[in-house]
Image (cartoon, rainbow, N blue to C red):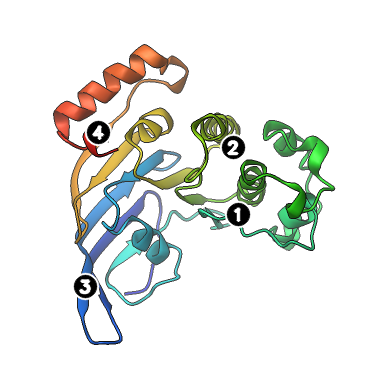
């Protein structure tokens, strides 16, 4: 079934997703996957490698329509959807600012992006080309490109994977800074429990393949109070509810 526009929240009901190889072998990636993300909420989809997290995002983005079930995206005056992938996918012949503005709808092409570039530490890099950027800076540009569209819903597929922890930590803080200034319904794929505990309002935990929801972990504490001690307490609570997952990090 194709996605149907509906009022918030983001609602997912994927009955089944099967991959078929050229040799005719069938692999069931998702089965009875059902969850919701409330309007304006930042949720993380957490689970082991190969459990169907990225496949779920591809379905929600309309990149994979070969599945059984349905989903409803939040609908408002613009209905725009933005995505940040593992690779920044910037156009090498365009500057930082051009890469961001090319993603904008016509109504926003002349928008003032000074505040957004400033929050992401890109103010002095707007005229640079992707080849002049580190991977961490390129991923900042990818974040800028997504937020500049003022999306109704934002999808993120492990945007900090393969970065060293110091760079990843800085980018997580930048993401929270920009998202707090421009709140939108967000769903991020991760396999990192502590990353999910830091960023999200709720964590949707998936099983091994075929992926389905094994439980929800609500993080009700405001983000400004999630210091090291609190994060350790949250991690212990998460481990008690979902034993063994932290050990696999």
Q: Which residue is mark 1?
A: 88
Q: Which residue is mark 2?
A: 182
Taking 106 as reference, is 185 above or below it? above
Real-space Cα separation, disc 4 to disc 1, in angstroms: 28 Å
Residue extending farthest bottom: 23
Horizontal and vertical percent position of residue 50: 28, 58
Question: For the residue labelled by badge 3, is the local secondary structure a helix, a strand or a loop?
Answer: strand
Question: For the residue labelled by badge 2, is the local secondary structure a helix, a strand or a loop?
Answer: loop
Q: Which residue is mark 3?
A: 27
First reached walking from the N terminus: tag 2 or tag 4: 2
For the point 44% across and 53% down, the residue is 74
Residues at marks 4 and 3 touching, judged by CB atoms closer than 8 Å: no
Q: Could you say which quadrant of the image residue 200 lies in?
A: top left
Image quarter in which the C terminus is found: top left
How packed mark 1 is, by other alpha carbons closer than 10 Å (few <14, some 14-19, many 20 or more), is some
Image quarter in which the N terminus is found: bottom left
First reached walking from the N terminus: tag 4 or tag 1: 1
Taking 231 as reference, is 113 above or below it? below
Q: Which residue is mark 4?
A: 246
First reached walking from the N terminus: tag 4 or tag 3: 3
Horizontal and vertical percent position of residue 223: 44, 22
For the point 58% across and 57% down, the residue is 78
Q: Is residue 11 visible?
A: yes
């Amino acid at each position: 079934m194709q996605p149907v526009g509906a009022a918030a929240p983001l609602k997912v009901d994927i009955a089944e997703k099967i991959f078929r190889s050229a040799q005719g072998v069938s692999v069931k990636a998702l089965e009875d996957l059902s969850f919701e993300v409330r309007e304006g909420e930042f949720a993380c989809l957490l689970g082991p490698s190969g459990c169907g997290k990225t496949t779920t995002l591809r379905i929600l983005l309309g990149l994979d329509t070969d599945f059984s079930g349905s989903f409803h995206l939040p609908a408002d005056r613009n209905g725009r959807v933005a995505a940040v992938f593992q690779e920044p996918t910037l156009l090498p012949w365009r500057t930082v600012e051009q890469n961001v503005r090319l993603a904008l709808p016509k109504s926003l092409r002349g928008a003032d992006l000074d505040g957004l570039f400033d929050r992401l530490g890109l103010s002095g890099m707007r005229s640079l080309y992707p080849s002049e950027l580190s991977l961490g800076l390129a991923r900042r540009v990818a974040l800028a490109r997504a937020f500049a569209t003022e999306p109704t819903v934002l999808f993120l597929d492990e945007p900090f994977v393969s970065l060293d922890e110091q760079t990843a930590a800085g980018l997580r803080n930048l993401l929270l800074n920009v998202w707090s200034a421009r709140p939108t319904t967000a769903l991020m794929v991760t396999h990192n429990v502590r990353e999910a505990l830091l960023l999200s309002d709720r964590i949707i935990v998936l099983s091994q393949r075929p992926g389905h929801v094994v439980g929800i972990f609500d993080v009700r504490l405001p983000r400004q109070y999630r210091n090291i001690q609190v994060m350790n307490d949250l991690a212990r609570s998460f481990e008690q509810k979902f034993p063994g997952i932290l050990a696999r990090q």
